[in-house]
Amino acid sequence: MPLSPMYSTQLYRRKGDPTHMKNYRPLSLANSDYKLFTRCINRRIMDVSTQLISRHQLGFIPGRYIAENGMICQLIMEDAQRKWTVAEQRDDDPTFGSLDADIGLLLDQEKAYDRVNLDYLRHVLLKFGFPVLW
């Protein structure tokens, strides 16, 4: 079935300079049949997703809370701050010696979905048993 009658894509300009492409987003306008079909496919995928997706992946999975990893990071930072404060109160040198190394690193990519390598994604889907014409 050709995709063209199912939806059309329009460019939607967000705030900012209209001459910069980064201020535009594609907006897909889909007909009702297509929306119903994709919702059915999505439900079938979600049935097997818990077997394929790591328990650490929290976003966009029903029953998982996307902010949980953020809360865990907050607890780790508070624990590191507490250890630092205790070491300072004991007059220890908090920069060396008595403290374990606590290092935090937060990485975030702008437009992360735009950076997905589609060949790699197809390869992974094949490995998980999805059909070639997915």
Image (cartoon, helix red, strand yellow):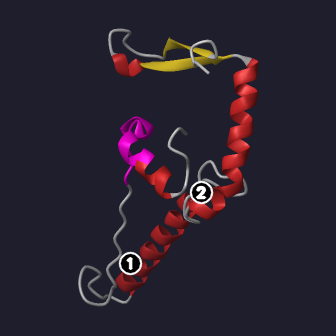
Q: Position of residue 76 (x, y in %)?
A: 48, 71
Specify the farthest residue to the left: 96
Q: Which of 116 and 68 lies nearest the eye of the viewer?
A: 116
Q: Tag 1: residue type?
A: Trp
Q: Is residue 31 visible?
A: yes
Residue 58: give its label.
Answer: 2
Q: Is residue 125 above or below residue 112?
A: below
Q: Position of residue 86 (x, y in %)?
A: 42, 84
Q: Tag 2: residue type?
A: Leu
Q: Which of 114 and 20 lies nearest the eye of the viewer?
A: 114
Q: Position of residue 117 (x, y in %)?
A: 36, 42
**Can you say which quadrant of the picture contains the N terminus?**
top right
**Residue on which the image places disc 1:** 84
Residue 113 falls inside the magenta stretch? yes
Mark 2 lies on a secondary structure that is: loop
Q: Is residue 74 above or below residue 5?
A: below
Region in magenta: 107-122
Residue 16 falls inside the magenta stretch? no
